[in-house]
Image (cartoon, rainbow, N blue to C red):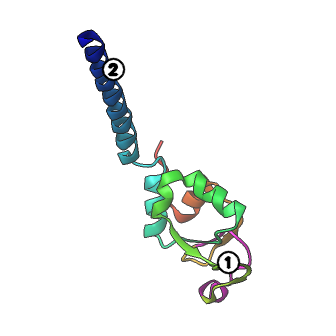
Amino acid sequence: MEKKKLEKIISIVVVILVLVGIGFFFYNKSKQPGEHDQVAQCLAEKGVVMYGAWWCPHCKAQKEEFGKSFKYIKYVECALPGNQKGQTQECNDAGVKGYPTWKFPDGTVFEGEQSIKKLAETAKCEIQK
C-alpha cells in the first residue's frame, strides 16, 4: 500500500511540474516584444491613425497583420455600438468612407488593408530586419 501511495504522490508532483513549466513558457512568450513593435510605435509617434470598425473583416485582418504590436497603433473605432450602418461623428469629421482607413498627418489617406511596409515607407519609419 505504501508503494502505491508513493507512486501516486510522484505522479501528482510530475503533473504539477509539467503544468508549471507550460505556464512559465506561455508567460515568457507573452512578455516578448511583438514582431512589428518598432514600426507600430513609429507610426503612432508620427501621428498616423487607423480608422476602423469592430465588425469589419479587413480591419480584423489588418490588426492580425500587426499582431500584438497593434497595441501601439493609434486606432479610432468608427462603428456605433450594435450598428453596422452608422459611424461616429469623429469618423464623419475625418471623412472616413470605408474601413480600414489610414490617415497621415501630411494628408495622405489609404483606404483598405495596407502592407506594413507601405505604411512604414509612407510615414518614413524604418523597418527592422
Callout 2 crowding tier (Cα within 10 Å): few <14, some 14–19, many ≥20: few
Q: Is residue 79 left or right of residue 5?
A: right
Depth-wise, is mark 2 or mark 1 nearer the camera? 2
| Residue 76 at x, y percent in the picture | 56, 75
Callout 1 crowding tier (Cα within 10 Å): few <14, some 14–19, many ≥20: few
Amino acid under disc 1: Gly
Q: Is residue 27 left or right of residue 120?
A: left
Q: Tell whether position 102 is magenta.
A: yes
Callouts 2 and 1 close, C-beta under 8 Å: no
What residue is at 73 percent from the left and 74 percent from the top? 98
Q: Is residue 106 above or below residue 4?
A: below
Q: Is residue 63 left or right of residue 73?
A: right
What residue is at 32 percent from the left and 23 percent from the top? 14
Task: Spot the residue most to the right.
Answer: 85
Q: Which residues are magenta?
A: 90-103
Q: Name the residue that disc number 2 marks.
A: 11
Amino acid under disc 2: Ser
Q: Name the residue that disc number 1 marks.
A: 82
Q: Is residue 26 above or below residue 38?
A: above
What residue is at 67 percent from the left and 87 percent from the top? 92
**What element does badge 1 sit on?**
loop
| Quarter occupied by the N terminus | top left
Task: Spot the residue most to the front.
Answer: 1
Between residue 37 and residue 23, name the one nearer to us: 23
| Residue 104 at x, y percent in the picture | 57, 73
Closer to the chain start, of discs 2 and 1, is 2
What label does residue 93 carry, if any? Answer: none
What residue is at 38 percent from the left and 45 percent from the top? 32
* Real-space CA distance between mark 2 and mark 1, rounded to the nearest whole angstrom: 50 Å
Between residue 47 and residue 72, name the one nearer to us: 72
